Image (cartoon, grey):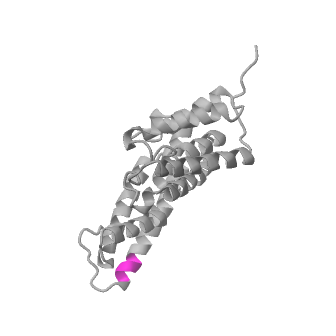
Amino acid sequence: MGVEIKESAVSAEEFADMEEFVHDYLAASVESEDDGGRMRWYPWHSADYRFNHIRNVVDIAENIAAEEGADVDVVRVAALFHDVAKLEAEQDVHAEAGARVAREYLRTRGDYPESFVEEVCQAVEDHSYQGDLDDVSLEAQCLIEADVLDKVGANGTALMLLRMGYEARTHMDAAKMVDRVLERGRDHIDRVQSDTAESIAHRRVKRVKWFREWLEDEVTEMDREGVDDR
């Protein structure tokens, strides 16, 4: 009786095909909705933003997985599919919906071992888990950590400032808005478990602190209400 090989190398060409599929799937999710979809008027809920977020998460997750000894193939494929259903499913079920899309793709468009398919899909399904990261696989942990880290740092700050424009806020509110990014970053430092993710989180939070200090130094009569000086 043969032994199924657990490791499954995904070639650059195969991964590029997966990227194209995910991009097109997100775009089709938006195009199929007459009203433009849930909160589509916010740029960061568009197909382009979502795909960019996914690529960011792939990069971060690969880094964490390589340093922490996780299965990098499982992690990067799971990261690529983790939000594939984000624009067509409700938030509380998008992880399960994404796992179904990933399973269908991997079973029909490649010759991947079933164990690999199931590990990828389980990580996708678990990426929205809010409990202790000890409860999920190391691969899911890497994905969860990468997903939350993309929302902090310079990228998180840029998105928060972009949101200010859509809320008709002035730059006078910027310090306290950036402080929300700091608060989120500190929450994520408490949540992540791997040394690699914690190191990334600290670097990103430091960048936000520097930006806020520069902003407060340069903008006269900055509204400091609610700003946390920790």
Name the side, left or right, on which 13 lies relative to 149.
right
Q: Which residue sits furthest top?
A: 1
Image quadrant for the C terminus? bottom left
61 is within the stretch colored magenta: no
Residue 120 at least partly seen: no
Taking 186 as reference, is 121 above or below it? above
Taking 50 as reference, is 205 above or below it? below
Residue under the image location 37 percent in, 85 percent down: 218
Q: Which residue sits furthest front?
A: 34
Of 136 and 44, the residue lying toward us: 44
Taking 109 as reference, is 216 above or below it? below
214 is within the stretch colored magenta: yes
Residue 209 % position (x, y): 41, 70
Q: Which residue sits furthest right?
A: 2
Image quadrant for the N terminus? top right
The majority secondary structure of the magenta stretch comes to: helix
Residue 205 % position (x, y): 44, 63
Residue 140 % position (x, y): 52, 39
Residue 25 at least partly seen: yes
Q: How many marks?
A: 0
Residue under the image location 54 percent in, 37 percent down: 101
Within the image, what quadrant is residue 169 found in? bottom left
Query: What residue range appears in magenta?
Result: 213-217
Name the side, left or right, on which 88 lies relative to 70.
left
Of 185 and 143, the residue lying toward us: 143
Residue 130 % position (x, y): 39, 41
